[in-house]
Amino acid sequence: MAALLELTDVTVRFGGLVAVDGVSLTVSAGEICAVIGPNGAGKTTLFNAVSGNVAINGGRILFQGEEIHGLTPHQISTKGVRRTFQNGGLFPHLTALENVLVGLHARVDSDILGLLLGTSAAKRAESAATARARELLDLMDIGHVADHLASDLSGGQQRILEIVRALATEPPLLLLDEPAVGLAPHMRSQLVAIIRRLASERGIGILLIEHAIELVMSVADRVIVLNYGKKVADAPPAQVRADKAVLEAYLGHA
Amino acid sequence: MLAVLPQLIVSGIATGMLYALIALSVTVGYRATTVVNFGHGDLVMAGAYATFVFVGSGLPFAPALILALASLFLFGVLTQRVFMQPIINGPHLSLAMMALAIGYAVRGGARLEWGSEVVILGRPYDQGAFMVGSVVLTMDDLVISGFVVALLLTLAIVFHITPIGRLIQAVFQSQRGAALVGLNVHAFHGMMWGAGAALGAAGGVLLGLLVPLSPDLGVYTLIRGFAAMTLGGFGSPFGAVVGGIVLGMMEKLLGFYVSTVFIDITAYLVTILVLLIRPSGLFGQRATVRI
Amino acid sequence: MADAPKSAAPATKAPPAWRQRRYLFWLIPLLLLPLPFYLGQYKQYVVNLILVYVPVGVGFNIVVGNLGLLAFSNVAFFGIGAYTSGVLALKLGWPWWATILPAGLMGGLVGCIAGVPALRGVRLFYLAIMTLAFGELLRWVYIRWVPVTGGSFGMSVPKASINVFGWPLPTEGDKFYAFLFLAVLMVVLTDRLLRSRFGRAFMAIKGNEQAAAAMGIPTDRYILLAFAWGGFVVGVGGSMYAALVGHVTPIAFDLAELILEFAVVMVGGLGSLVGSVLGAAIITAAPEFFREWPGFQEMLFGVLIVLVILFLPRGVASLLARVHPIFIDRYYRD
Amino acid sequence: MQLSKTFYALAAVAALASPALAADNMQGITATTIKIGNLGPFSGDAAVFNPLNFGPEAYLRYINDKGGIHGRKFETVFADSACNEAKGIAAAKKLIYEDKVFMIMGNPCSGVAMAIKPMLEQEGIPWMGPAANPKLTRPTSPAMFHTTYTGIESGEAMAGFALSNPAIKKIAIVEHSNDWAHGYCNPASDFIKKNGGEVLTRIAMERGSTDGTTQALQVKTLGAQAVLGCLYQPELIILLRDLQKFGVAATVVGALGADFDQTVQQVNSPAAVRDKFFQPYQFKAKIGTPALKEFEDMFVKYLKKDELPKAGPPTNFYYFGVPVGIVTVEGFRRAGPSPSREKWIAAIESIKDFDTGVLADTVTFSKDKHVGVSRMYAVGLDKDGKQTVYTAWGKPLPE
């Protein structure tokens, strides 16, 4: 099976510091792949490299067989790589619905002239988008807060909203940056269920960073361990759990 | 034409010193609060008028000056605490507008009192001129340059050696960090805003030595101060002074050798060129903010 | 996902039904239609001046309120609009109505230029100072380019040129209808833009530029679009100014004018279309009420803005929003 | 209720429109009062010129105190133009349509004056004022009058005085880049070229300048024998100081935007001004001499505290403004016991060789000449530092 995302020898340097050091990895459609590692191991930098927020100094990043490094974040996003943010990338001053509509941005084909003239085609495009956004919210059971400000939602709702927003354009690949941070235990299990559903039912490839090791072990098909920017392990959870070197390197810090 | 070059440079430095002082005073407030006081020009003006009032009430120049600076310091502290602090986390536009509006009100007050006449502060010393080679130097040049250099040295000591300086650095880098080390950030903001106002007032008094007072005294100079800050690097006191001096010289050279019509826009051209070519200025750390 | 929202803001709880009734806003221009029959030349002029400042506030608000960038270049858009109309009418003999679109387009062009530094990552106070410098440079051009602009004396817009398809507008009452049409048009168009994916893109960029880009929004293009549309709307306002005042001079577009335009946005309500209209009305009409104490005007003006920022951070529009949810703009919240 | 309101509104419009054309216009006149609009920059950065508005006001109060004209007293409505066109038009409209004044006493800001000119012409509102912009009365506008010197008279007087020194041929001009400065220095420049002089250069010196090194060195390098400074007082002071600093011996002729006494006092250096700095002089004698004493007393007696300078005697702007009041009143005196706009305008146009008691020239108007005065003197300090009024270079006005 051809890999959805393929990183080959990706290196990112900040001045003298090598944040990501020759990392190679692949994510296939429908696969849940977790990246773990101690703080400062380069996980988020790796994400930023994939999403185009950080330029890479070496290696290549292929998405669906196409080079995406060097593209701008919005171009990469438009190609079908969507991400969430560690510290909440929601637009707090927009409602949940509007947040999803922003996620749908590229799919709303209303042109500016049509909008200004108020043509029915433009109006239809907009209302179709709104209907679609409500549908997506309902699908994830947060339709009842559609008209609330994102900043007024609970932590769990915010996490889910961010995922809904990222998925609005049905991207083949989803990058989740610490989706479970600050969630209550029962919310975590719901989150796990959602992630599994996305991968199995829709065949979305998922790359996620997570600190909560139990969550990682329960959800991931494959676990990649980073330490000081280098990949030290890439194996199914059970195997990683058994790897003494990984435990030393990672759990010692955690 | 080249015969006047030394004179242009020396006069440029003297003029630039004034811009430097205004830039320095904005920098002090900015370092402490990360907010640029867009109404600073009116505090500059208020300092000059305050000195004028105290001299008019019969005080000798020096005590009048000190009283004026103290008043402006208090005014700065008060306005920061009462008007700026409550909205410090609001949109930057509100902060900019608040500072502008306070300045506008101050200017309106000055206009009400002195708007329909031209008043002068007068010099507390003789208006002498000396020849140094072919270059003419005046007492004004010496007083202004001396004051700014002394001030820069003092600030260098305060910023880099005293504990207060380290606090200023800490707050500049991270507001939360400063709160963690047990600093009353609010009080600190107020004090530094006041210090900026007092320094601006000193700039106003030096301006008042050269030109008659008017309620719009500070507005023109503030733009030059901003340009000096941009050129030197935002937030860098040393950069502010160097930026001011370079700007002063550029105005003179551009004005003399190209055309006097460029004097007025040198500051704008410098601002735009610096921000497009080297946004961090000569000595700044970073001038762009990517969110 | 049954847990309730942390805090239920009353505004967002309102059912969307009232949004369907937004056509009620059309009552406002309709009710204004008979105004010229009641107002004398002076009051009608003040109303017309308010209408000039409606697009000025609306356009400014797009950049500073909706896009959230600290740009001080609005007065440059205003000036270029006024000068474009003035030059076309005086030098080329165009009728005023034909100069409105070029004035708007020039405003949009200047808006694009003013927006360029923002694309290079210049933000906050740097952007403020840079755009301020840009506006003053443009003013310098008005003063220096004497053959075209008339230099510091400015230029008089020929009275005969102030017509709509040849229909002259000799009185303030006649101008009122043309201005009302333009102001309403600018408000309606901007409203449509802001309610669409374009407006949402502006607000997303304001909220979190990185996240906006991650949603596939080409942020640079949208920043330019906001500046261009803002410039266009303000440029149309400039064209109206040229027709109303009839005399275009460089000092009309100085820093004092910039502060006035800021006040329109701040007092009305940052990021609020309703606020821009209200702000234009308040800031333009207020000095007329203080005519008896001219010396106090500047001071009162400063104090007014201070009080609004302190106690009504979202402007007068937020007061109206409390009266009825129909006045809540869906564009901006802190 | 609503209906009657509409009715009155329509009636008012009709009343304004039709009969006014037929009969003489008596708007602003009652049996006991004459309403005058006084338009000026009472706020903003041009407020420094508002003594030009208080000068005529003092005279109207003086006349009122003496019983008025033909039993009518003057009632002034002040309106602030803020020197801003949009605000100035609002102010003028309020005076014309709300306060319904008889006439408007002018606004010194020429931009505003130009902006309101079409409206004044349309309504036939008489205007009399001190604005420097010559375009207000050239070509002649039926109801607009300049009782004081416009930029043309003043600018030509500046150039003329410099050229009246046979040794002076090469002249440099230093000016603000605004309409006010160009209003003086453009005619001055034309005058120099027409009368055998040479304009070496026109140098810009902007408002808010703190230093005049560049300008002074350019004047020096070019070897100018005289400098015309179309500058406001603060910048004029800086230029004089810096010319002195670099030992430039050129004669300096300033424009009317500065007060001579204050300028001399604030330059604070006798060598920089004695026998060197001159200004066109609008008045028949030196301010402070017995010839003008009655006016000083009038200002002090009739103006309120906040209408007078904080310190010192009234400045020359008060004297420069007062003829507007004097000639206006003279118009009413001549217009007879039942004045109208038409009669007043005719009365003003009948004024010939009228001595205002303050201006250097006598006032003469006619149907097609609405600028009343032209001759000006010059004022300066002689070699001993004595303030002297000159009729031409080296020719003091006999006292």
Image (cartoon, rainbow, N blue to C red):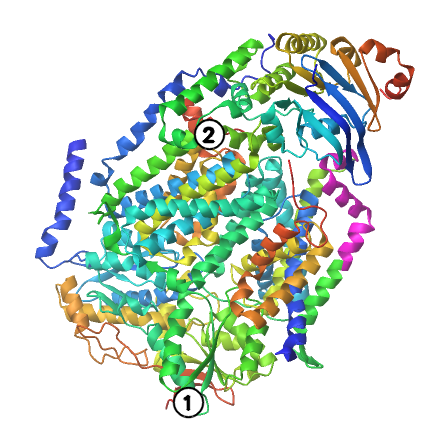
What distance separates the C-alpha of mark 1 from that of mark 2? 69 Å
On-image quarter of the N terminus of chain B = bottom right
Residue at mark 1: chain: D
Residue C98 visible? The answer is: yes
Q: Is residue C252 magenta?
A: no
Between D243 and C288, the one lying in front of the other is D243
From the viewer's perspective, tell me whether residue D136 is left or right of residue B279. Answer: left
Q: Secondary structure at mark 1?
A: loop
Residue B89, placed above or below residue B129: above
Locate residue D30: give its quadrant.
bottom left
The residue under the point 75% across, 17% down is A34
Label 2 sits on what residue type? Ser
According to the picture, the residue beneath numbered tag 1 turns out to be: D393
Q: Position of residue D112 (x, y in %)?
A: 34, 59
Q: Position of residue D373 (x, y in %)?
A: 28, 77
Provide the residue span drawn in magenta. B153-181
Q: Position of residue B137 (x, y in %)?
A: 67, 76
Residue D133, placed above or below residue C327: below
Q: Position of residue C264 (x, y in %)?
A: 44, 41
According to the picture, the residue beneath numbered tag 2 turns out to be: C318
The residue under the point 57% across, 9% down is A141
The residue under the point 91% across, 15% down is A244
Q: Main secondary structure of the magenta part?
A: helix
Q: Is residue B163 magenta?
A: yes
